Amino acid sequence: MDARPIKEDAACEALRHDWSRTEVAEIYRTPLTELVYRAQTVHRRFHAPDRVQTCQLISIKTGGCPEDCAYCPQSAHYDAGVERQGLLDPQHVIEVAREATARGVTRFCMGAAWRQAPEGREFESVLEMVRGVAATGMEVCCTLGMLTEVQAVRLREAGLTAYNHNLDTSPEFYGSIITTRVYEDRLRTLAAVRKAGITVCCGGILGMGEGEEDRIGLLHQLATLRPHPESVPINMLVRVAGTPLGSMPSLDPMEMVRAIAAARILMPASRVRLAAGRLQLSPEATTLCFLAGANSIFVGEKLLTTPNPGPSEDEKLLETLGLKPLEPHAV
């Protein structure tokens, strides 16, 4: 079976961007077993059911971010024990990317703790990284904070294929998590990325104290973007001591399953990424996330500064489930 997903323009008759919030709520509140069955049915229409894309994420500039995102240990506002690190040498990053390619990784993501991508020497270094990673044949993704339209164009010209900029939560709850920027700032960056011809990676985080209505609101925002984000990462809060959300109660893993299933139904052609927080999920809960339509994971023992399952754990689980990494030619 061809592992390549159906592209959005090839299946536009099956896609919708005019979901009402009421419709999203009805889908989200469907009894879980029925919801997962419906999501898996949709998933098989658009994607190879036995393929999972493996992605790797590296922090190219760590700590000292001026934003006050309540979940983030890299914020300069909190003492979360994260050691600040300046921008990495481009050749080091490119070598890490080459090693990832040798392990079968097909998407390489670079994250920098900036509020806004800088100009000058640092941005030139990022462009050098992008060019080097693109030369490996992998998808290249960056998350550098807010972008201008000119910066987005330069990144695309260097070979960037995707840009990550999460909405995090609903517009209504956003101000409870971040006060140093507004929701519209996020949307403006997404618009700049689209205008430059770069695909969008955009999702959110569950378990930050939001209610069900906020999860519905996040999904509604994502599902009404035109076009849908090509990549939709669903993260579970990783609680880090020293951040305002460090003592939040743990999230019921079934809420991850429910959100992934709803995302798969609402955005059928997108890759739904089971992202941060996987160490908090049992193998059984992770299996349900795959059944619900997740078809991408981040590999490697760390996601920026937070822990992630090791390679042997991931290999064992995928082998047990009969899932195979997506081949480079099928990206």
Image (cartoon, rainbow, N blue to C red):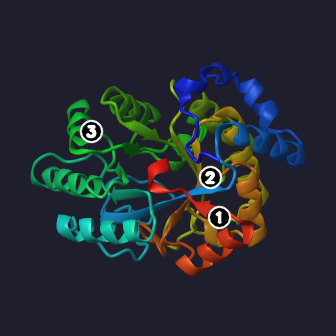
On residue 295, the disc is 2
Mark 2 → mark 3, Cα distance in angstroms: 25 Å
- Residue at the spot 78% in from the left edge and 57% down from the top edge: 254
Can you give x and y, in whole percent of width and height, for residue 330 in the image?
50, 48
Q: Position of residue 84 (x, y in %)?
A: 29, 71
Amino acid under disc 2: Asn
* Residue 272 appears in the figure: yes
Q: Point out the tag, 2 or 1, that comes first from the N-terminus.
A: 1
52 up-or-down from 232: above or below: below
Other-residue count near label 1 (Cα within 10 Å), few / some / many at <14 / 14–19 / ≥20: some
Q: Residues within 10 Å of mark 3 (few under 14, many from 20)?
A: many
User: Viewer-nearest of labels 3 and 1?
Assistant: 3
- Residue type at mark 1: give it: Met
Name the foreground residue: 249 vs 131: 131
Which residue is tagged 1? 248
Q: Residue furthest left?
A: 121
How crowded pointer 2 is (Cα within 10 Å; few <14, some 14-19, many 20+) is rated as: many
Say which residue appears at 20% left-offset and 32% top-offset: 150
Residue 273 horizontal side relative to residue 286, left or right:
left
Q: Check disc 3 and give the amino acid type.
A: Arg
Question: Which mark is first along the chain, 3 or 2?
Answer: 3
Residue located beneath label 3 in the image: 156
